[in-house]
Image (cartoon, rainbow, N blue to C red):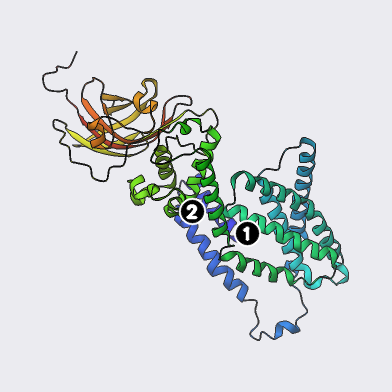
């Protein structure tokens, strides 16, 4: 509560006084509260003689009030939500959503914490309600756990195991065991709760049964199954089978690659797809290449278009990645005034010779337009890049340069765009997610060509 209050005060500085607070300030505040104030506040209540704790019979009233009038009502609210949701599932026949895990976890956390806090005084006359609450809580938790088990089982069947699903499944199993123990034994030893939870934490921390290892094995097997079911190969991107891969399968392959790259690193993908998936040849951006960028390149080499997790069935995506060439010969490009490397999403603004230029998408003409201020210089049609899916195999000049060469349309100036990779969609209009390559341009026309007036 202290942290929430202080963060709220910091957030109020912007609308009240126009003072912006950086994210670093919130991090420092959280660190101070968690690692300085909270430990000192807790330790201040420990007597100098630890043996005195065994002789004390007093119980802090604030803990009783907190458990009885805050935690217990919260448990009741979550239980009402979960009961109503269970009725909705039974009536509509729809599977529970991913939100169920958060709701059940919150209900279990609040309920178990309340029982632990009030347990020392459960036998007092005024606290006889604790026993009734405990038994009712564990009984009411069972239907919620059944819903959670169905939800996580369906997700695992569809998308395999990840660290999040692993921990939710383990938590559900632990809660089911704890609930059964306290339902069958009204006077069960509450010390079994922290003891078994600690053992569970140690068990899931490392080894072949840990969350990390199990998730890696599950997602690797899922990727191998998807790849083998369509006979996809990195060294044969034009295979006929690649054209028959459904949108959902492409989305599943994309998301699985994203997960393996971002969570387990490139080696996890190499173990499934072999040395050809080595990202030193797949992603020239090296350390700066993110999971999605590497996934796009892998899929492009198999002749597939990458599908992001937010894209629907109607998404008209396209992607182009030039073949990876270990040694690119230098190529002279005479007569150009400026050169600019591209490695981001348009619009791209940059300085050249003290002048400001902008490379932005012209959705109406399906092109990239280069401007100096408000004055157009030239434009680069992207029809060829939009039409191509997968790696581009072209004539010798394109192959030597490692990219698709796009000459600028006639304009005030002239330019050449060497595209190494570009991805985007034509869902509503042209949208580019990213473009990498080199831009060569001049703000004057070729020699011997006069500007039209």
Closer to the camera, 421 or 138?
421
Mark 2 touching mark 1, by CB under 8 A?
no
372 relative position to 426: left or right: left
Which residue shows up at 19% across the image and 34% down it? 338
Q: Position of residue 98 (x, y in %)?
A: 65, 45
Q: Residues within 10 Å of mark 2 (few under 14, many from 20)?
A: some
Relative horizontal placement of residue 413, taking residue 141 as reference (left or right): left
Residue extending furthest toward the top: 453
**Picture residue at 52% right of the left edge, 34% below the top:** 311
Q: Please, is residue 63 above or below residue 409 in the view?
A: below
Location of the N terminus (image quadrant): bottom right
Q: Position of residue 49 (x, y in %)?
A: 66, 86
Q: Which residue is mark 1?
A: 1
Disc nearer the start of the sequence (2/1): 1
Q: Nearer the viewer, residue 291 or 378?
A: 291
The residue closer to the viewer here, 112 or 77, is 112
CA distance separating discs 2 and 1: 33 Å
Left/right placement of residue 46 relative to residue 363 reads right
Residue 373 visible somewhere in the drawing: no
Image quarter in which the C terminus is found: top left
228 w.r.t. 8: above or below: above
- Residue 292, can we see it? yes
355 sits left or right of 273 in the view = left
Question: Of tags 2 and 1, which is closer to the observer?
Answer: 2
**Disc sitting over residue 263 in the figure:** 2
Identify the disc placed on residue 366: none
Instruction: Indicate the secondary structure of the residue bearing disc 2.
Output: helix
Instruction: Please tell me whether mark 1 sits on a helix, a strand or a loop.
Output: loop
Q: Nearer the viewer, residue 176 or 120?
A: 176
């Amino acid at each position: 509560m202290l942290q929430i209050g202080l963060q709220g005060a910091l957030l109020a500085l912007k609308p009240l006084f126009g003072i912006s607070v950086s994210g670093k300030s919130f991090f420092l505040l959280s660190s101070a509260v968690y690692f300085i104030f909270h430990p000192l506040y807790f330790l201040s209540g420990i007597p100098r003689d630890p043996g005195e704790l065994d002789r004390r019979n007093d119980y802090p009233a604030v803990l009783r009030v907190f458990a009885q009038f805050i935690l217990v009502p919260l448990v009741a609210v979550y239980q009402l939500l979960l009961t109503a949701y269970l009725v909705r599932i039974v009536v509509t026949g729809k599977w529970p959503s991913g939100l169920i895990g958060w709701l059940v976890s919150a209900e279990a956390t609040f309920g178990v914490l309340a029982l632990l806090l009030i347990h020392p005084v459960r036998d007092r006359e005024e606290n006889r309600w604790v026993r009734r609450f405990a038994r009712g809580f564990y009984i009411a938790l069972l239907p919620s756990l059944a819903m959670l088990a169905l939800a996580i089982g369906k997700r695992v069947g569809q998308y395999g195991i990840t660290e999040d699903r692993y921990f939710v499944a383990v938590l559900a199993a632990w809660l089911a065991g704890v609930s059964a123990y306290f339902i069958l034994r009204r006077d069960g030893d509450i010390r079994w709760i922290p003891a078994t939870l600690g053992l569970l934490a140690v068990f899931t921390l490392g080894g072949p049964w840990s969350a990390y290892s199990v998730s890696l094995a599950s997602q690797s097997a899922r990727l191998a199954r998807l790849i083998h079911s369509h006979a996809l190969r990195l060294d044969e991107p034009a295979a006929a089978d690649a054209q028959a891969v459904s949108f959902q399968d492409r989305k599943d392959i994309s998301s699985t690659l994203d997960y393996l790259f971002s969570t387990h690193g490139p080696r996890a993908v190499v173990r499934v797809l072999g040395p050809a998936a080595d990202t030193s040849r797949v992603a020239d951006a090296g350390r700066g290449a993110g999971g999605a960028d590497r996934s796009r390149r892998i899929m492009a080499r198999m002749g597939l278009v990458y599908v992001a997790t937010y894209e629907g069935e109607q998404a008209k995506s396209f992607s182009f990645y030039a073949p990876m060439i270990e040694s690119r010969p230098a190529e002279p490009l005479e007569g150009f005034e400026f050169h600019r490397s591209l490695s981001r999403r348009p619009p791209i603004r940059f300085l050249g010779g003290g002048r400001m230029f902008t490379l932005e998408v012209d959705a109406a003409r399906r092109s990239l337009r280069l401007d100096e201020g408000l004055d157009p210089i030239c434009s680069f049609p992207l029809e060829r890049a939009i039409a191509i899916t997968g790696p581009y195999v072209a004539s010798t000049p394109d192959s030597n340069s490692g990219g698709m060469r796009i000459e600028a349309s006639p304009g005030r100036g002239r330019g050449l765009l060497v595209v190494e990779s570009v991805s985007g969609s034509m869902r509503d209009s042209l949208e580019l997610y990213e473009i990498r390559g080199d831009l060569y341009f001049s703000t004057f026309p070729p020699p011997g060509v006069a500007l039209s007036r």
